[in-house]
Amino acid sequence: MANSMVPTLLHRLVLVLLLLLLPVLNSGQAEGCATPAAAARRGTSLRSQAGALLHWKSSVKYSSKHQLGTWGDDGMYPCNWTGITCGDTLSRRGTMGKVITGISLDGAGIAGRLDKLRFQSLPYLVNLDLSDNYHLSGAIPPGIGSLSMLSTLNFSGDQLSGHIPASFCNLGQLTGMDLSSNNLTGQIPPALGNLSRLGFLYLRGNRLSGNIPWHLGQLQNMREMDLSLNDISGHVPSALANLTNLNYLDLSDNRLSGPIPKELGHIQTLQVLHLEKNNLSGTIPPSLGNLTVLTYLTAYRNQYTGTIPAEFGMLSSLISLDLSDNHLTGPVPYSVAGNLTSVTYFSLFGNHITGSIPHEFGNLVNLETLALSDNLIVGSVPSSIGNMSSLKQLIIHNNSISGELPTELGNLVNLEYLMSYENQLSGSIPPSYGKLVKMTQMRLFNNQLSGPVPPALSNLTNLVVIAQPGSLTHGFGRPWVPDPNG
């Protein structure tokens, strides 16, 4: 008798343990994400799908010249409607039938809301594009979570408001989501971390707040993530380093603070990193030098301190580097000045950079803009800059640069802007500058320049020269004053 009770007691014990563990087992799911009930797709006819679209059409305004004007009110032949794509599916009877798989109404002039669109009646939908309808407003209905086959969703350029529904986590097939340029508010739902197939997430240009959920670091297929132009605060989560397929990350124009996670240097696939216009602080991690395929690194208008990592010299694919308007100190590392041979834009203005301009800059033959102004740079302008054959803008004003202007700058036939005012330059303007036929502005005032202005500069018809009156003279010995008309 006692032995017969053992299985019963064991069964009860297992049941109690399962009940205790159930909350723990469910906790792996991001907050706000409930497993949707299986959709009864086979009971949704093409006629009922068309009826759902016509019901929504009756609730919005639209231009008859656009897509909705072609939708017949009888609900017949929706696969022939403009903006509607159909596909085949197997019916309950084993026969093939048509279903609506795509809605593409971008720029259709729709004015209205989404709450009259019965998403539950469109269970076969794979692609949904309602972008650039500037008068499509209101909230995104939670019912959108019923579109369990949806692969791409584009609501960009509308006027949608309210929160991003947590029901989005049910869109398990979603590979691309674009909600940019709307008026969405609230936090980014942590439940988005459940969308394991998601490769493209664009939330740019809304009014989202709160922190970046660490759950986004679970999206192993993520290729591009744009959270810029919002009101997001807090730290950049180090979990983003788990996105080992990420090519593009834009967190600019927010209120992010704290340091750049050194773990971001592990994302070997990263090509574009935008961090500008935040309140990020601390030193720039040398580990970013491991991002050997990085082409754009912009981190201006933050609160970074410390020196520029010499490891940045390993960023051989870099095209643009902008660390301006920070609190960086120390000299420009020689490795950075000389090794970035693909770079076209290099900006460090508005920091506390010291030392001289490295002559290694002369190796950067593709560089078009060199901006080192508003720093504490000393020494002379290296003659090697004359080797930078692509240079269009040389911006070095408001430093303590001394010595004479190099004659070799006359080799820069593409130079348009020479901004070296507010320095301690001496000597005269070299006659070779008369070859700078593309020059439009040569601002040299508040230096210690003297001597005659080369007559060849008079041939540069687009030039506005601003120098220190009284020290420079015409070739005839008269004090030279620039022509305000050019």
Image (spheres, helix red, strand yellow):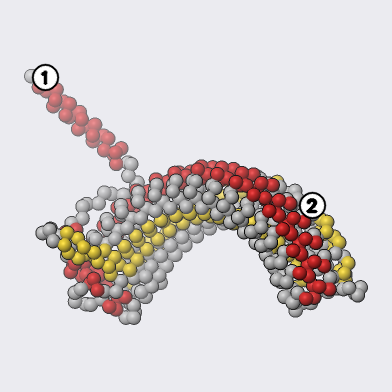
The residue that mark 2 highlights is 379
Residue farthest to the left?
A: 1
Is 309 drawn above or below residue 171 in the view shown? Answer: above
**Residue drawn 63% across the image and 53% down it:** 341
Residue farthest to the right?
A: 477
Quarter of the picture holding the N terminus: top left
For marks 1 and 2 on the same chain, the one whose residue lies earlier in the sequence: 1
* Residue 327: % across, % down: 66, 50
The residues bearing labels 1 and 2 have C-alpha atoms spaced at a distance of 94 Å
Residue toward you, 447 or 477: 477
* Residue 349: % across, % down: 67, 56
Q: Tell me which amino acid carries mark 1.
A: Asn
Mark 1 residue element: helix
**Residue drawn 23% across the image and 68% down it:** 52
**Residue drawn 20% across the image and 30% down it:** 14
**Residue drawn 27% across the image and 78% down it:** 70
User: Mark 1: few, some, or many residues within 10 Å (few <14, many ≥20)?
Assistant: few
Q: Is residue 25 visible?
A: yes
User: Mark 2: few, some, or many residues within 10 Å (few <14, many ≥20)?
Assistant: some
